[in-house]
Amino acid sequence: MTELPEIRPTDELSASEREALIASMRPEDAERVPELHEVDVPPELRREIEEAMSRYPQIRSAAIPALWAVQRRYGWCTPDGIRQAAAVMGVTPGYLQAVASFYDLFHLEPVGRHRVLVCTNISCWMRGADTLLAAFCEAAGCDPGEAGHGGASSPDGELYVSGFECLGACDIAPMASVDERYYGPLGEADAAAIVDQLRRGAEVMPERALARRPAAGGAEPVPDPRVAEAERRRAGETGSARGSE
Amino acid sequence: MAAETRLLFRHIDEPGLATIDGYRRRGGYRALERAFRELDEDEIQKALQDSGLRGRGGAGFSMGQKAGFLPRGEMEKYVCCNADESEPGTFKDRELMQKNPHQLVEGCLIAARAVGARYAFIFIRGEYWEIADVLDGAVAEAYAAGLAGRNILDTGIDVDVVVHRGAGAYICGEETALLDSLEGKRGNPRLKPPFPAVQGLYGGPTLINNVETLSNVPHIVANGPEWFRSFGTEQSPGTKVVSVSGCVQRPGNYEVELGIPAREIVEGLAGGPPPGRRVKAWFPGGSSAPVLTEAELDLPYSFEAMAEAGSMLGSGAIIVADDSVSIPELALRTARFYHHESCGKCTPCREGTNWTVKVLERVVRGEATPMDLDILASVQENILGNCLCVLGDSMAMPVGSMVRKFRAEFEQALEGAPAALEAAA
C-alpha cells in the first residue's frame, strides 16, 4: 500500500490543494474487499456477524448488526474491527465506515468504558437536564463543553458522558441512559452516586430503573364495559381465558 | 373526573403479561388463529379498512387503505414495524413493547398475513436496547410455540419476524430512511413516489406501520371493526396512548378515547402544571406539531380537531410548557434538535435549520434585531414543502407557530429592548 499523506479536513484545504487531492485519487487505489484469509477475525465475532447475515433476505442488512458486534467486542468501531466485519460480509471497509459515521451510537474513536447519555431535549430540559449533564461531567471528570457537543471521556477512560437528543423517556425526565439502561428522574446527587457505582462496579440505582416503573395511571382501573364484554366473549370461545380478571 | 380507557394498556402492569403464557391466558394470539385459519387476505384487509384505524406514528393515515395499496400476486412483500420512536416527547411505543411485546408481535404477524408478506421486520431504535431484548424474547417464544416462522399453525404459511436494532438517528423514523437503514445503508430518505407500498424494502412492496397501530390489529381482528368503531370519534376511531411530559405533575402514558377534551388529559390525568403555575403553550403531537395555547386545551383531542386548530395530533405526545418557560429558549431547543438530526441531503433543511438556530441564539442572547424575526419567519416558509421528507417542516411548523403566537415575547428579547438589557445586566 502507498504511504498516505497527512490527513486534514477538506474544509481546511485551499482550492489548489483540493484539486491536487482529487487528481491523486485513482479508482485502483480504493481499498478493496478484504479476503477472509487476509484478516484475522475472532471466531465468535465471525459467528455473530454470519448469524446476523442469515436473518435477512439480503446480507447488507447485517451492516448495522455487524457494527454493533464490532463495537461490543472492541469498545468502539476500530479500523481493524471494521476490516474484520467487512471481510466476513464481503463489503469494503469504506462502506461500513460510511454507515458507521451516520449513526450517533457508533463511535469511530475510543471512548470511556461506561456510557452515560443524558437527554437534553425539551421535556428533560424543562425539568433540569442541563444541570444533570453538568453534574455527571463534574462527577466523572469530563469536559462539560465537549460533553454537550458530541460527548467527552474521563481522563481515566472509565466514563463517557454525552448530552443526547430525546431518548424517549420524558416520563422520567430528567433522565439518562447508563450502559444502555434507562434511569430517572435523576437529581444532581444521583449523578455523583451513579458515577461512583459505575467506578466500583456496583449495580446502578435499581430503584430508578425504568424497567421497574409502573404505568403512570396507577392501578388497573375498572375496565370499560365494551372491553370487559369482549374479554368475556373471548373467554367463552376458548374456555381457557382464566386470567381475564 | 377523567378516566383512562385501557385497551392496548389493559393489564399493563400485571406480572407475566410480557410472557407468551401470560399473554395467551388473557386471550392473546386468538386473533392470530382467526386470521391464519378462518380469514383470507381480503377479509382481514376489509376489517382493517372498516375499522377506520388511523396510523399512530404521526401522519394518521388509514392503515387499511395503506395495506390495500400493496399489489397482489406472487412477489416478495414485506411488513416493517416502525419502532424507531424518536419524536421528542413520545414514549408510548416504548412502554407498549416493554410490557406487552406479544401484542405487537401478534399484530405484525397478522399484518404480514393480510398483505402476503414473508418477513415482518421490527425496526427499533438502538437506544431502546433493553426493550429490544424484551422483543427478542417474545419473538423467540412465538417461534417456539409455532406462531411464527415456518408453517404457522400448520397452515403452510411462513412469516419470519426479525427484530432490527438501529443505531441512533431520528431520521430513520421517516419511513423511506428507515428502509435504507434496514438495507444496511446510511439512513437517507428517498424520493417519493414510488411509495413504499409499491417499491419499498429491497425494491418490494412494503407495508410500514407504527408500533401502536400494529398493536391495535389483534383487537380489531378479534372483536370486529364495529366494536372498534364504538371507541373514539367518527373520524378518529379507537383509543390513543398519549405520552404527557414537560411541566406536569404526573408525566407518563395514558390511554384515552380519541375525542375527549385535551384538558382532561393534561390536567385530569397528568395533574397539570405544578401549583401556582399555568399552562403557557403545549405541543399536541410531539415537538414537530405547532404549539397551541392554554385556551385550546378545551378542544377535543382528535386528529380532526387538532388539524382544524392548525396543529396535529401527530404521534400523540403532549409536551406542556408552563409560564416559567421562555418561549424563545424553547424554540431554540426545538430547532437545535432538528439541526442536529437533519441528514443534510436537501439544502432548505440543512441550511434552514442552521440559520434558524443561529438567529434564535441571537434572540436568546439579546443580540437580535427586529429584522431577525422577519428572517426567522421567512426561513421557515422557505423550508416548508421544499424537501424530500418532512424533517425540515417539522422544525418550521413549531418554530413558526411560536414566533406567530408569542411574537411579543420574542420582541421583548430583541437588542435594546428593556427585558433584554435587564437579562444582559
Image (cartoon, coloured by chain):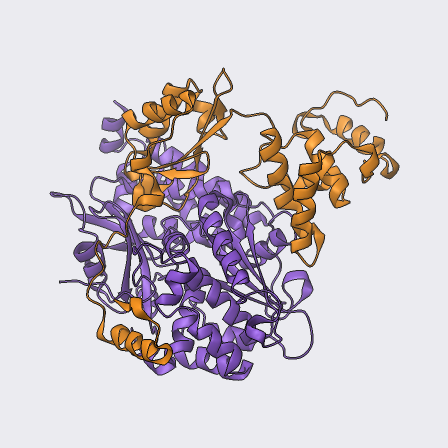
Chain colours: A orange, B purple
Which of the two residues, B98 or B125, is positioned nearer the viewer here?
B98
Lateral position of residue B105 relative to residue A80, left or right: left
Lateral position of residue B99 relative to residue B421, left or right: right
Q: Position of residue A88 (x, y in %)?
A: 75, 42
Q: Quadrant for the C terminus of chain A, please.
A: bottom left
Q: Does B310 appear above or below A88?
A: below
Lateral position of residue B119 relative to residue A137, left or right: right
Asked which quadrant contains residue A110, the reply is top right
Q: Does B127 appear above or below A162?
A: below
Residue at image location 54% in from the left, 59% down from the top:
B175
Q: Position of residue B71 (x, y in %)?
A: 63, 77
- Residue found farthest to the right: A28
Q: Position of residue A140 (x, y in %)?
A: 41, 20
Q: Quadrant for the N terminus of chain A, please.
A: top right
- Residue found farthest to the top: A155
Which of the two residues, A238 or B408, is positioned nearer the viewer here?
A238
Does residue B147 show up? yes
Q: Does B352 appear above or below B31?
A: above
Q: Position of residue A26 (x, y in %)?
A: 86, 36
Does residue B57 show up? no
Asked which quadrant contains residue B79, the reply is bottom right
Residue at image location 70% in from the left, 46% down from the top:
A50
Lateral position of residue B164 relative to residue B215, left or right: right
Which of the two residues, B137 or A176, is positioned nearer the viewer here?
B137
Which of the two residues, B186 or A183, is positioned nearer the viewer here?
A183
Give the total of numbered labels: 0
